[in-house]
């Protein structure tokens, strides 16, 4: 598994074969097998065994391939809800389940077709009859596989679409970065996080999820930049966008909103603060952190004005004095500012996020009542010898 996609349940799935490829593989393997050696058998008996083997081999190859193909896909109801929702938006959960179901169902049909034809071959009294049954077997197997063509194609499309989703690790805290376009979200993420942020395709070509990471000692925090997604009012969204935004609910432990108070900004400060309101309602589980970027563009008076407005807003919002006082006014270009924000994030994650019920249970797993500790194992327990 490549490090890039670790966490993405679709990352390691191998390409899905086309119907013709499956059939070519099965029939060529079946036609390559050697005649069986039967002591004392008649020529007809040998012929019967030979053709039975061929039918069996073709059916087994097909059943085996389809089985492996379906099993590579994760059980959609068992994966992390972030991926479940993305699966639904990108390829349609129901359609994917239907295709997997039809392919899986065909495995049984393949086996019963082979069993039925083998019974018929057993009864044959002439060589030509035996060959004709084998021909019929190949014909019926081909029909079954050709009927799966749309499902195989759908599966392959789903695989290529989903394989490039970014890797999200549910046991690591995640900071989701929001804010109107051009405020400096990407500049912040690339200045603050390690390595090149990964970019992944999203429903619309302009909408992507970009992941970066910061290591705080042993603690790794994930950052998700959201170009084209968390940058406008929710009221302006269509259903698919809203669903994509909702998918982020499952990963946002911290909602980091970047604000650009400069005159160069495309939205006014008031409009940007309104967005804070909307998003915090939408992500009630996430810790809120606001950073005011591009302070290098402000003169002293404007800066004082901006500070007052932002702090007033956050006070109305219910943040504590300490939190308001700590709101960073930064420039993404200044490494000491980036360092300060990183320290604040570390503090927030260690003191709030990791102490939330979601992470506390992960760090401190509860032992279920029906699980014995080693020293509590009953005497007659024969598990350990
Ligand atoms: N003056 C100044 N410009 C910045 C700062 N941070 C980002 N920018 C610029 O703002 C523009 C938009 O930044 P970008 O990170 O792409 O914004 P995004 O759309 O929110 O991801 C770019 O031209 C950046 O170079 C900053 O702190 N000060
Ligand atoms: Mg950006």
Image (cartoon, rainbow, N blue to C red):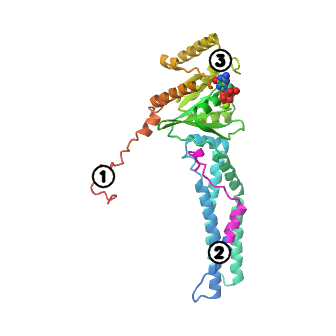
| Depth check, front residue: 168 or 98 | 168
* Residue depicted at 58% across the width and 12% down the height: 308
Of labels 2 and 3, earlier in sequence is: 2
Residue at mark 3 to residue at mark 1: CA–CA distance: 64 Å
The x and y percentages for residue 142 are: 71, 66
Residue at mark 2 to residue at mark 3: CA–CA distance: 75 Å
* Mark 3 burial class by Cα count in 10 Å: few <14, some 14-19, many 20+: some
Residue 77, numbered circle: none
* Residue depicted at 68% across the width and 56% down the height: 152
Q: Which residue was labeled with disc 3?
A: 269
Of labels 3 and 1, earlier in sequence is: 3
Residue at mark 1 to residue at mark 2: CA–CA distance: 53 Å
* Displayed-image quarter of ligand 2: top right
Q: Which residue was labeled with disc 1?
A: 377
Q: Which residue was labeled with disc 2?
A: 54
Does residue 13 appear in this view? yes
Q: Are marks 2 and 3 in contact (CB under 8 Å)?
A: no
Q: Secondary structure at mark 3?
A: helix
Q: Which residues are magenta?
A: 1-28
Label 3 residue near ligand 1, CB within 8 Å: no
The x and y percentages for residue 118 are: 63, 75
Name the image quarter holding the C terminus.
bottom left
* Mark 1 burial class by Cα count in 10 Å: few <14, some 14-19, many 20+: few
* Residue depicted at 60% across the width and 13% down the height: 309
Q: Seen from this angle, which residue lies furthest front?
A: 335
Place residue 245 in its image quadrant. Answer: top right
């Amino acid at each position: 598994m490549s490090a890039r996609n670790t966490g993405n349940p679709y990352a390691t799935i191998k390409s899905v074969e086309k119907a013709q490829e499956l059939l070519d593989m099965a029939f060529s393997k079946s036609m390559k097998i050697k005649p069986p050696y039967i002591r004392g058998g008649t020529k007809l008996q040998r012929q019967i065994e030979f053709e039975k083997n061929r039918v069996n081999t073709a059916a087994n190859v097909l059943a085996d391939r389809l089985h492996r193909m379906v099993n590579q896909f994760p059980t959609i109801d068992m994966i992390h809800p972030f991926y479940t929702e993305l699966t639904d938006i990108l390829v349609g959960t129901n359609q994917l389940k239907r295709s997997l179901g039809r392919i899986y169902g065909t495995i049984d049909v393949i086996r019963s077709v082979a069993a039925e034809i083998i019974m018929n071959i057993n009864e044959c009294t002439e060589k030509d009859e035996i060959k004709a049954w084998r021909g019929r077997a190949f014909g019926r197997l081909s029909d079954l596989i050709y009927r799966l063509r749309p499902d195989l194609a759908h599966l392959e499309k789903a695989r290529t679409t989903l394989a490039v989703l970014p890797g999200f690790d549910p046991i690591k805290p995640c900071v989701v970065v929001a804010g109107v376009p051009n405020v400096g979200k990407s500049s912040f993420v690339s200045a603050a996080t390690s390595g090149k942020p990964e970019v992944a395709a999203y429903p619309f070509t302009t909408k992507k999820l970009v992941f970066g990471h910061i290591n705080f000692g042993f603690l790794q925090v994930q950052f998700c930049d959201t170009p084209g997604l968390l940058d406008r009012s929710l009221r302006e969204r269509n259903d698919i966008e809203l669903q994509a935004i909702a998918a982020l609910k499952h990963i946002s432990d911290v909602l980091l909103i970047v604000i650009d108070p400069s005159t160069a900004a495309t939205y006014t400060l008031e409009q940007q603060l309104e967005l804070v309101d909307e998003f915090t309602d939408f992500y009630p589980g996430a810790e809120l952190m606001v950073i005011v970027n591009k302070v290098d563009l402000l003169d002293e008076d404007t800066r004082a004005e901006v500070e007052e407005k932002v702090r007033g807003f956050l006070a109305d919002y219910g943040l504590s004095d300490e939190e308001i006082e700590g709101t960073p006014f930064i420039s993404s270009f200044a490494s000491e500012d980036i360092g300060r924000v990183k320290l604040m994030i570390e503090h927030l994650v260690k003191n709030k996020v990791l102490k939330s019920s979601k992470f506390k249970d992960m760090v401190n797993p509860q032992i279920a009542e029906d699980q014995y500790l080693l020293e509590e194992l009953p005497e007659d327990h024969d598990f350990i010898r």
